[in-house]
Image (tube, grey):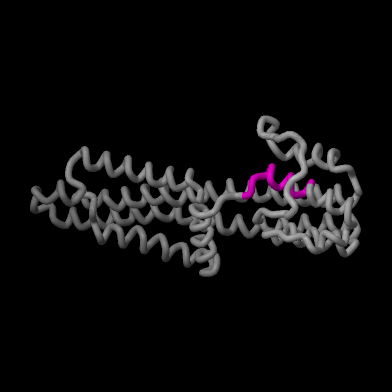
Amino acid sequence: MDFASLLGFISGIALIITAILLGGSADIFVNIPGMMIVVGGTVAATLLTVRFSDVTAAFHAAYIVFTRDDTNPQEMVDNMLELGKISHRNGLLALSKVETNSNFLRRACNLIADASSQEMVQKTLQTEIDSLISRHYVVQDVFRKMAAYAPAFGMIGTLIGLIQMLSRLDDPSSIGPAMSVALLTTFYGSLLSSMLFLPIAGKLKARTLMEVTNLEIIREGTQGILANDHYANVYDRLSSYIPEARRKPLKIGRSKAGGAV
């Protein structure tokens, strides 16, 4: 589980609720018609903009943000070093039997075992990486669009409330409460955008960058295996993807190439 995402969301909501309770009753912040306008309008506009399959994929990705950790790049470096050791000891064909949770790594191992050329492997794996970036961009864009729509529908709800308020100007005592209700939809839209949609989009982008780093490590490690480089030389190339302060001393990893892509 990604505790940073969960902690950020819970602490943010807790601080907002605490501020509301310290300022008075929380009942004044509840307005069902306003919630319907903001939430319903945001979802409807998003469905009009993107495909339904992209929306479902986006919410599935948001679930992953809170429930799954990324593979550490250092772990992926260790995996590629271990694969290099296996290829030196048992030959390239042995890589076809490597057990891994990563579809990308499995694809790379099969290309190596099939005696594909370095150029073909490079182009195939790079195409996979570019395709992943494009798919992830679509998912991130769903939440960026929702972050833009939510405040807009909040303003629409405020305008509706102001129109209803102005229609009752003959009763001055109702202006204050009516204005409060009118502003609630703007509050809902800003809260959803700033506390939910934009942070999720940002987290998904960060996850994409981390995943691409892991894929680049696999691609570069594959080139080292095909070139029959010594694992120390491969390590020097792969470690460049990791910040210097976080690099571990050279070592051979596990007997299985794990990690999810």
Report if residue 153 lies within the magenta region.
no
Q: Is residue 242 visible?
A: yes
Q: Is residue 239 left or right of residue 7?
A: right
Instruction: Report the label total.
Output: 0
- Give the residue at x 88% y 64%: 114
User: Would you say the magenta stretch is mainly helix, strand or loop?
Assistant: helix
Residue occupying the point 29% across, 54% down = 159
Query: What's drawn in magenta, residue-wise?
Result: 71-81
Q: Residue, x 83% and y 54% (percent of image)?
A: 122
Q: Position of residue 172 (x, y in %)?
A: 9, 48
Residue farthest bottom in this picture: 52
Is 114 situated above or below 145? below
Residue 75 lies in the magenta stretch: yes
In depth, the one of 259 and 34 nearer the eye is 259
**Left or right: 216 in relation to 39:** right
Tell me the residue at 56%/58% (across/down).
139
Q: Position of residue 189 (x, y in %)?
A: 36, 51
Q: Position of residue 85 (x, y in %)?
A: 84, 49
Q: In the rendered view, does 260 fall on the left or right side of 186?
A: right
Q: Is residue 202 left or right of residue 104?
A: left
Which image quadrant is residue 120 in? bottom right
Residue found at the far top of this picture: 245
* Front residue of this view, candidates 12 and 133: 12
Where residue 95 sits: x, y (%)?
82, 59
Confirm whether residue 216 shows in the render. no
Q: Quadrant of the C terminus?
A: bottom right
Residues 121 and 42: in front is: 121
